[in-house]
Image (cartoon, rainbow, N blue to C red):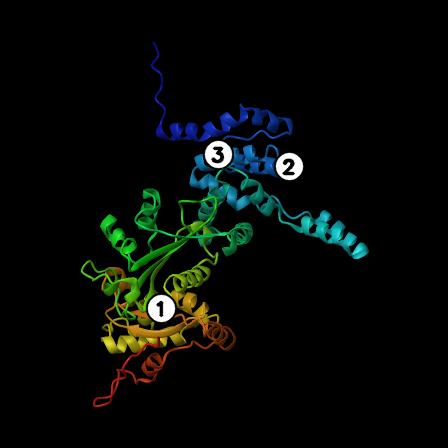
Amino acid sequence: MNTPRTRTPAETASARRRNPLDLLMNSGLGKLLRGIGVAPRPASGESLLDLADALLSLRGRASGPALASAFFDLYEASDLAARQEFLGKVHDLHPADAKAIDQAIARWNDKRDEPSALALNVASKSPSRRLINQLNLAPQGTQRLIDLREDLLAVPRSASTSGLAALDRDLENAFTAWFNAGFLELRRIGWDSSAQLLERIIRYEAVHQIQGWDDLRRRVEPVDRRCYGFFHPQMQDDPLIFVEVALTQQIPGSIHEIISEERETIAPREANCAIFYSISNCQVGLKGIPFGNHLIKRVVGLLKEELPHLKTFATLSPVPGFAKWLAKEQDADAPVPGAQELRRLAARYLVEAKKGGQPLDPVARFHLGNGARLEAVHANADLSANGQKQAHGVMVNYLYDLADIEANFFALTELGTVVTSKAVQTLLEEPEGGPKKGGKKAKETVAA
C-alpha cells in the first residue's frame, strides 16, 4: 500500500495561491473569460496580467465588478514577488494607443468642437488609469487599490522602472481626485468611538506613541482634549489622517505638558490656545495626497465655531531632520551642544536649510507651506528616545494666524523667506555659542 506523499510547505502555499484562480475559471465568469480568449496561467504576475487584459477588453460594465473582485482575490492571494512582477509590467504592456490619439488630434484640428475635444481626452487617457477605474468597481475597491499602491511603493529604488513610476503617477492622480477634501468627512474621534477605530488610532499614531488604552483615553476623553480625522465614504472606520488637539492656557514648550499622566484638566472656557500636537497619516498607499493642510484649516474653523473665545492656534511639533543635519554640520565626535546653542542651531536649520527652495525639514515644510509662522524653539521638549534621536529633544511651535496665512505662504513660495517671530529672529542673530557673557538673554515671547 502506497502512503500518500506529504506536500512541502512551498507546494501547499502554491496550491493555496492557485485556489482563487481555479475558482474563477470554474465559475460563470471563467466561462466568460474563456469566451473572449482569456485563460489565465497559474498564479503569478503573468496570470494577474491576463486578468488586467480581460478588464481592459470589456466593452460593457456588467461583468466589471465581478472581474475586478476576481483580480483582487488573486492579487491578494499571490506572494509579494508575483504582485510586484505584475506592477512592474502592467503599464508597459498597455501603452497609449498612438493611432487613436493621432486620429483624435486630426479630428480636433478639423472640427475644433466639444465632441472632438472629448474624443481627444478619451483617446489620450492612459490604459493604466482605465484599469485603475475598473478595479475600483470591486467591493472595497478603493481600499484594495491603496494597498496595491503600498506594494508599489515598497519596491526598492534600485529595482524601480519607468513603468512603475508611470503607474504610480496614475494611481496618485486617481487618488488626488477621489480623495479631494471636499468629498471627505471630518469627524471627531472620542472615547465613545468604535473599538475598531480606537485600535487603529493606537496603531497609526506616528508622532508620540500611544502606550495602550489608558494613554489613548487621556488623549481623547477629557474635556480639554480633542481628536479629529478625515474619513472617506468607502472607509468609514479607517481614518485617512487624524490630528490630536490640546486646549491650553498658554503655548506649551514641551510634550510632557500635554501628555503627562499628572497634568490637570481645565474647562474649555478657560483655554486660550488650541495646540495641534500630533498629526498622523494613516494610509501608506496615499503618500503624496495633501490632506493635512485641509484638515488643520477645517479643525481651526470647527474650534472657532465651538469655542469662539480661543485666540491662538499653534502646534507643538517635532523637528525630525535636525539631528541628521547637525551631524553633517559638526565634527563626527563633537558633543551635543547645550540647550541654548541647540535652540540657535535648530532655528538656523529651520530657516536656512533648504531643498529645492523649500525647508529641508519635512514637518517645517508642511506647516510653513500651510502659511504658518515659526514661533518658538524649545530645548529639552521631547525626552523620549525618538525625540532624542531625531532632534536631541528639540521641538518647535508653528503659529497659525488666519489673518497672515496667505502672506506667509507668499513669502515662502515666491520669496523663499521663512516668516518667524521676533523671538526666533533673536535666536538667529545670536553669535555661535550663545549670547556673550554679561549680555541680555532674549526673552522668548509668543504672539497671541
- Badge 3 amino acid: Leu
Q: Residues within 10 Å of mark 2 (few under 14, many from 20)?
A: few
The answer to whether any part of residue 318 appears in the image is no
Q: Is residue 96 above or below residue 315?
A: above
User: Which residue bears the numbered disc 1?
Assistant: 309
The relative height of residue 185 versus residue 309 in the rendered view (above or below) is: above
Residue 129 on image: x %, y %: 59, 47
Instruction: Name the residue nearer the viewer: 339 or 4.
Output: 339
Q: To which residue does mark 3 refer?
A: 74
Mark toward the start of the polypeptide (2 vs 1): 2
| Cα distance between the residues tagged 2 and 1 | 60 Å
Q: Sequence order check: which comes first, mark 1 or mark 3?
A: 3
Q: Nearer the viewer, mark 2 or mark 1?
A: 1
Answer left or right for 330 relative to 24: left
Look at the picture and state if 290 lies above or below 332: above
Residue 57: image tag:
2
Q: Residue at x 42, y 71 (%)?
A: 372
Q: Secondary structure at mark 1?
A: loop
Q: Residue furthest top?
A: 1
Q: Are marks 2 and 1 in contact (CB under 8 Å)?
A: no
Please identify the residue farthest to the left as the structure is shown. Answer: 262
Which secondary structure lies at badge 3?
Answer: helix
Q: Quadrant of the N terminus?
A: top left
Q: Is residue 257 visible?
A: yes
Q: Depth check: give the residue in front, 54 or 174.
A: 174
Q: Are marks 1 and 3 in contact (CB under 8 Å)?
A: no
The amino acid type found where label 1 is placed reads His
